[in-house]
Amino acid sequence: MTVNETSCHTVSLADFAEAVAAYGDVVTDPATLTERGHDFWGVGATADLLLRPHDRNQIAAIMKTASRYGTPVVPRGGASNCSGGMMPGAGRVLLDLSGLDQILEVDVAARRARVEPGVVNVDLQERVAPHGLCFSPDPVSSHLCTVGGNVVENAGGPHALKYGVTYNHILSVDVVLPDGSTATLSTDDDGPDLLGLIIGSEGTLGIVTEVTVALRPVAEVTHSLMGAFRTARDAADTIAAIIASGVVPAAVEWLDHAGIAGLQKLYDTGYPLDAAAVVLIDVDGTAEQVDRDQTAVEGLLRDRATQVRVAQEDADRTALWHGRLHLPVAVAQSGMGFFIGDVTVPRDRIPEMQDAIAATAVRHRDGLTFIAVTGHAGDGDLHPTSFFDPDNPRAAAALAAANDEIIDAALRLGGTITGEHGVGTEKIPFMTKRFTPTEIAVQRSVKNALDPVGLLNPGVMLPDRSAAEPDSGRFGAAVGDAVAGRLAEDPGLPLTTGQSTDISVNLGNLSMIVGADATVEQVNRYLAENRVSCAAVPADGGERTIGAVVATATGTERTHVRHGLLGVDVAVVDGHAPARFGAETMKDVAGYDVKRLFIGGRGAFGALTTLIFKITVDG
């Protein structure tokens, strides 16, 4: 940067600060800028100024001013992000939303709450608990993370297996777009699922100013079980057997041998040190349901595990879960160097993923102390945490190589590069491994449609443009039209293509892949023959194709499709190039959730070829 550029830049920020002073507190104190610019893990950068809005209604004016001055804005919530998703930096303004922490309304009868984005997850939980309700997303960082952060990261947590991720519990959001315009996006909207596009967008498409969340009743009874296993394959096969039995546990968590042994040096996990893997399971519901499910789960554990523990009282359950839930705090306070990974594979591929991570740890033992594997086994979401001695000169190279190998293994096994932590800045290099140039181009067109100048959270998620990326102007224009409410239905656009009617079910993963031209009748017949169900498939529909159901979904059908759709294969409207968005993985927050646009999109974004859905086993 030249001296003249620096001078202009300084004047520009000074002018911006003066222009927004009426809308919030402007902070330039270096210590505050440094502290607020770094996350819980110490990752981040220092902005030139920080802005705390006086109230949520001022954010539109702030963004209009930022748009006028061309000032990049980095939103900040609880800063518990694990992927370097908040990088304020020089020339950028840090918009601190943590003070917007009011719970605006709790509607007990309707089981919903309206909150500001800075409400801390656990504060909402404590507010609604006396009513026998909870907000289902429960990341381990719930004492730090905000509801707004949960939205833009599509947070999960241990209990997402049964109850879903954040996406499944958001009813509407008020959002300020980069140009300062505002929108309310709701599950009740028809047309493309724009709410789903904002969820998981990592603060790059808009600033969430208010959230209406769905609340669910706290289960009447919850019991916990632990199984210790001789091999990772035994553990994974037992998980598959539990799910295939028709029991849907509230949580299924995983810890491997290296993790237990390594973490035992930091704190007493309470888990068997000779186990190859330990699995923690919650079953919940009414007393009758828990008795039934616990009997089934405990029976399978006792047939297969080397050790089984059952915790029914709250104190015993807390003790059983302590080793898993205490991990983030212990890691942060360990004094060791560490990196928390996040990959997801179809759950039936967990043993192969575990083997790949173990082999990586052996290959890089000259630079890494150990790799602990924990995670949400019911979702196939694993967190390999690499520990190293910061003074070891081999550590940096070993860490980089190990991370590369773990990502490559996940992709090779049909997985994805991040299940719940997000891309941030840390996983940008892997986006071109996860996605084809067409798929990256489509995501870039989403960003350009909503933020053409690149003001919001710059440098996050998308890699630099490649010459291999094709034009995706029509796709981007359709996104812009949808956001503006002017996306017109074109009867000439095909809803499906490829004429595929193939259907296959993966019972180990509880997923179904179906050709978009299969009829509803064909799909229902296949489901009945295989004794599985898929809520996204209407009970009747005759010769209507399943692709048409998704592309034209409204009302109740749209609701079921939203919650059941895992992935789509499509022919993108620009040039009809093939692309896949989503996968068989139960959790996937790599890039923008483009598959949501095809729900009710009526062909505007391309024609559907293949669909991937969640299924359940019939009881």
Image (cartoon, rainbow, N blue to C red):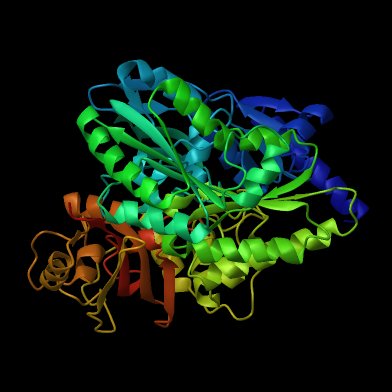
In the drawing, does residue 364 fall left or right of residue 252? right
The N terminus: image quadrant: bottom right
Nearer to me, 241 or 618: 241
Which of the 4 image quadrants contains residue 214? top left
Which of the 4 image quadrants contains residue 515? bottom left
| Depicted 480 relative to depicted 465: above or below | above
Q: Position of residue 603 (x, y in %)?
A: 29, 71
Q: Position of residue 183 (x, y in %)?
A: 40, 43
Question: Which residue lies most toward the top here?
Answer: 130
Q: Position of residue 203 (x, y in %)?
A: 55, 46
Residue placed at 27% from the left, 73% from the top? 504
Residue placed at 34% from the left, 49% from the top? 300
Q: Position of residue 252 (x, y in %)?
A: 43, 45
Instruction: Report whether residue 429 is seen.
Output: no
Nearer to me, 328 or 17: 328
Which of the 4 image quadrants contains residue 145? top right
In the drawing, does residue 502 fall left or right of residue 34? left
Instruction: Report whether residue 88 is seen.
Output: yes
Nearer to me, 482 or 15: 482
Q: How many numbered discs sit on the rendered protein? A: 0
In the drawing, does residue 142 fall left or right of residue 607? right
